[in-house]
Amino acid sequence: MTDIPPKPPSDESPSQDARYKPPTRFSQPKPPALPKRFILLLVEPEKWAEAAMYRASATFWPLAWALIIATLCMGYSMAAGSIKPLQAFAASYDQRFLPMQLNKGQLSIISPKGKTKLIPMKVQTPLETVMADPALVGAAKLTTHPLIVLFDRDSMVLTGSTWGGAWVIMPMAQLQRDVLAINGLLKPSLAKSLPTDKLPSIILDSKTLPALMPFTSVILGLASLLAFLLGFCLWTVLMVFMTGFLIMSINRNIGMPLKVAWRISMAVMIPLLMLRGLLAVFGVVPAINPSPLTDQIIYMAPIALALWAAVLANRKFSKPPGGKPGNL
């Protein structure tokens, strides 16, 4: 009788390597819906640490929301903060400043006889300077104040040391059309369609300027949006980059990679951006803050919050005694 040879070992039997499965360190579960995720990151510090569990885009989009909302808050603060001083300026214009004339899309200053004590328009507030100087043709570069709204001969310009240049807010021809329409001297449709050289001339003084002030404050707020958005983006990128290394070093005992730490850094910036915007809306800290110390405290706050988030992450994902490490 022939002996039956033994069966060779089956390939299906698990090897030692196959039986060993290291714990999952970097899981990416499905995150909550975006609106819910955004609110949780605002009100629950533990959610900053939990950002390590999700893909980077799950935190990036709430961060984008925060950037946009904070920028809109700053623009609103700029507009609301400027309207009262602009209205006061318009009411007392004739007692302090020379009248101006808009004619054929250009600005000129009128010097009435016997009004030698009057000067060209210039009003200064803690937030901005509003001035007229037709001699400054084109987009003038003035660096004597953080924010200047300049009326030159041909255009309305936003300039000053804060902006590092000059932006044309509105051509003077458009301003002439708007002043005529706002004061009821020309129908809006006609003011829009008439050639510039056919527009009636108009004097800017205490009779015509008050109606223009709300419109001017809105233009100022809208013109500042791009600058605030750029500033917030630069602040966010810098802080995320810096605090990511801090969070990674505090969590080196659990082997947290830098890309995971950056997810937490992005989460930390969300409540800070919203806080800065709300402080401006409620007038606690103005959009353009005259106190550098306050700004320094606000802009360095992400470091303190990153330390807090790093400790929360370490507690959440560290291996407990006799247990398994949490997922990152």
Image (cartoon, rainbow, N blue to C red):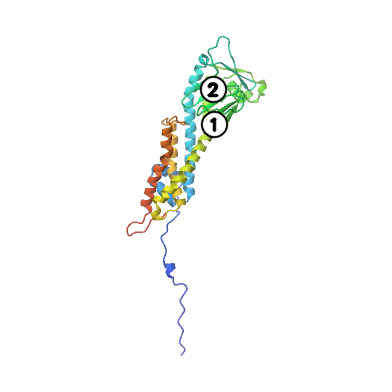
Q: Residues within 10 Å of mark 2 (few under 14, many from 20)?
A: some
The number of numbered badges drawn on the structure is 2
Per the image, label 1 sits on a secondary structure element best described as: helix
What residue is drawn where x is 41% and y is 66%?
20
- Which amino acid lies under the numbered mark 1 shown in the image of this protein? Ala
Q: Does residue 63 lie above or below 186 as drawn?
A: below
Per the image, label 2 sits on a secondary structure element best described as: strand
116 or 187, nearer to the observer = 116
* Left-right relation of 75 to 306: right
- Which amino acid lies under the numbered mark 2 shown in the image of this protein? Met
Q: How far apart are the alpha carbons under marks 2 and 1? A: 17 Å
Residue 28 percent coordinates (x, y): 45, 54
What residue is drawn where x is 62% and y is 18%?
201
Q: Does residue 212 lie above or below 117 as drawn?
A: below
For disc 2, the marked residue is: 131
222 or 265, nearer to the observer = 265
* Left-right relation of 49 to 228: left
For disc 1, the marked residue is: 223
Q: Residues within 10 Å of mark 1 (few under 14, many from 20)?
A: many
Quick check: marks 2 and 1 in contact, CB under 8 Å? no
